[in-house]
Image (cartoon, grey):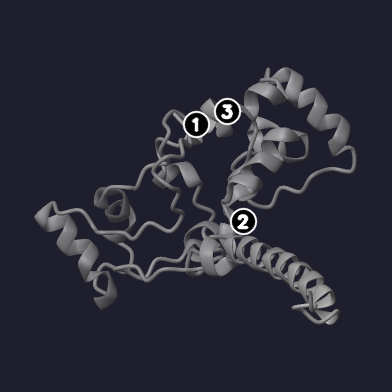
Amino acid sequence: MAQIFHRSANFLASFSLLGAVVLGGLALTGVLVVARSPYVTNERLSRNQPIQFSHKHHVGDEGIDCRYCHTSVESSAYAGIPPTKTCMNCHSVLFNNVGYLEPVRESYRTDQSIQWVKVHRLADYVYFNHSIHINKGIGCSSCHGSINQMPLVFQASPLTMSWCLDCHRNPQPNLRPKDQVFNMDWKAPADQEEAGKKLAADYKLRTTVELTSCSTCHR
């Protein structure tokens, strides 16, 4: 019986299979890279707000403590958005006639909340509690970056699952004394490895198994 396929068909078949595997690997790699890219995670993305508000001015220049506006950050899952009255504590006197603050004054007069645009967005199936992180020695800047230097707030971290797990697996490098949690200029000391271990014991951090359990963040 005559040979149906040329002998080169064996090479072509092998090359096609190898090519399919390589292309599949490249496609999977591409998907994973894109999924972790700022294009998808919104890292370094700022959002337009209804009012010009500069954390650099209020926090970095004027030294206003985070808790003055985010009053529930130490006791609640949510940091809290300040009511307009908090703004008016200062702006009833300071810059009380400038045009770009008219939405603040109108909000105060009408008792209608300012519609701030959320910058740090987690999926609905992710549970995050600000207070537990604050009370375990994780500083604001560990997640939010140097927000005291941001004229317009942007998402400084990817907020991906792998990014969170990196810290949950090894939180010691990010732990700081509780009186430094709101210090935006805090830098880890040279002995942070030892200091972190001591703070982890003092704060009674859960085991790595518990911190990386699915139910810790997905409830």
**Mark 3 crowdedness (10 Å alpha carbons): few <14, some 14-19, many ≥20:** some
| Pointer 1 residue | 131
**Is residue 4 left or right of 94 when viewed as pictured?**
right
Taking the view exactly as shown, the residue that stands out farthest to the front is 1
Q: Mark 3 points at which residue?
A: 135
Name the image quarter holding residue 29: bottom right
157 lies left or right of 125: right
Kind of residue sitting beneath label 1:
Ser
Q: Which residue is drawn at 42% across and 41% down?
A: 79
Q: Which of marks 1 and 2 is nearer the N terminus?
A: 1
Q: Within 10 Å of the Cα at label 1, are there few (<14), some (14-19), or many (20+) other Cα atoms? A: some
Give the spatial CA distance, label 1 vs label 2.
18 Å
19 or 68: nearer the eye? 19
Numbered disc 1: secondary structure: helix
Residue type, numbered disc 2: Gly
Q: Which amino acid does label 3 sit on?
A: Asn
Whether residue 139 appears in this view of the structure is yes
The residue depicted at 47 percent of the width and 60 percent of the height is 58
- Estimate the x, y position of residue 211 in percent, counting from the top left: 64, 27
Q: From the viewer's perspective, is residue 165 above or below residue 102?
A: above
Q: Nearer the viewer, residue 69 or 120?
A: 120
User: Looking at the image, do the residues carrying marks 3 and 1 touch, with CB atoms under 8 Å apart?
Assistant: yes
Please state if 5 lies on the left or on the right of 68 as rendered.
Answer: right
Q: Can residue 171 be seen in this view?
A: no
Identify residue for label 2.
145
Disc 2 packing (10 Å; few <14; some 14–19; many ≥20) = some
Q: Quadrant of the N terminus?
A: bottom right
Q: Which residue lies furthest to the left in this view?
A: 110
Q: Is residue 75 above or below residue 122?
A: above
